[in-house]
Amino acid sequence: MPLPAAWRIRPPLRHPHDREIWRLAVPAFGALVAEPLFLLADSAIVGRLGPAPLGGLGVAGQALAALVYVFVFLAYGTTAAVARRVGAGDLRAALRQGIDGMWLALALGGAIVAAGLPLTGRIVAAFGANAEVAPHAETYLRISLLGIPAMLVILAGTGVLRGLQDARTPLYVSVGSFALNLVLNAVFVLVLGWGIAGSAWGTVIAQTGGAAVYAAVVLRGARRHGASVRPSRAGLHAAVSSGVHLLIRTLALRLVLIAGTAVAARMGTDETAAYPVSFQIWTLLAFTHDAIAIAGQAITGRYLGAGDAAGARAATRRMVEWGVLSGLFFAVAVLAARPYLPALFTSDEGVRSALLAALLAVAALQPVAGVVFVLDGVLIGAGDMRYLAATTALATAVFLPAALAAYRLETGLTGLWTALGLWMLTRLVTLGLRARGEAWLVTGAVRG
């Protein structure tokens, strides 16, 4: 008996929505993977200075990443708001909304610099830097904080262009700014001998250049469509309102990452060494799922802004199908590579054994992750931020006692990854139930 049409997974590249999905997802994937690749290159350059500067780069990099990760709502919320206006056919209002998002980013960045500079030493100490590493970390962090406003403007600018259905320009800017960063680091560190400060200044200059490109592109669009470039109270209020709920969602996700690392660190040496590797593999695979989710943000917002709820649901169904297919593909790929992956990272048998167990869970959760990432992006695009904040907090509340139980029952990484599986399944159920209903399908240029 054939499956109902709604449940069939259509042949690849034969669906009406495939072109728009991959037109946005492929460049988004390129932008996502560009950053870690260039950061690895930065580490290779600083590593020539010795272990202490490299350790300082690692500590300061963690602090900066934590700050930027918290404000990722500047990209996601701006994408959703701008895409709705685009769907409604009002490019002037779309650019107006995007400009307000960039003003908010600049204001938040300035506040972080003002608050962070006097606390540089305490921030480094909070990340556990020892006496040898701390001076290098403080030097890098103190200089790099000056680039935070540019980094946040880049996040908001990325959201503006993705909302305008342009994912290629963010890719070009990402590659260009990271390439400039690499060149400047090589010159400042290896040629001029500025040490770790040279690496920091190279990063700040590259980030400022990237922010300037985004500002120029958006301002050019504003002039073309007659949009004001001054901040508006209503636009800033809308950006803050959506940002608060996305911030709650982001903090809940961040808590899971921190708690997982903390639990693994208390399980034993083997688990402490194996867990970051397994999670890095998980993160690498997540880039593909997240690329589809970013496409979902832009596509969903545009359809709902145009008043086409049926189109939004049809596109969502197709993106979920792609999420399932990519999840199944990566599950098989991880299982096939599993016997060989531990040898790339360690020769210790205990660490290998722990990593092999963790990779089974990583593989098993890929199809779930494929759907969860897509639906998360779709609901962000729909502006359903309040629901996302509540359900992500709920999923985190499920994870925390499960992770604690894994530690107390001494179940190792298998238990910890089971807790992460419960976290993902909770998100799958809550997001799936929402997507099946009608409450998220609010049409119009602005979500009421």
Image: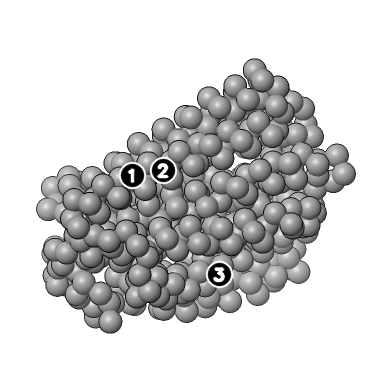
Residue closest to the eye, 76 or 373 = 76
Q: Which mark is residue 216?
A: 1
Residue closest to the eye, 355 or 213 = 213
Q: CA distance from mark 1 to mark 2?
A: 6 Å
Q: CA distance from mark 2 to mark 3?
A: 32 Å
The residue depicted at 30 percent of the width and 73 percent of the height is: 435
Q: Are marks 1 and 2 in contact (CB under 8 Å)?
A: yes
Comes first in the chain, label 1 or label 3: 1
Q: Residue 180's spot in the image, x, y percent?
A: 48, 29
Whether 447 is drawn above or below 254: the answer is below
Q: Which mark is residue 212?
A: 2
Q: Which residue is mark 3?
A: 252
Amino acid carrying label 3: it is: Ala
Circle 3 — which element? helix
Q: Residue 407's spot in the image, x, y percent?
A: 73, 65
User: Which is in the foreground here, disc 1 or disc 3?
Assistant: 1
Q: Residue 80's spot in the image, x, y percent?
A: 31, 64
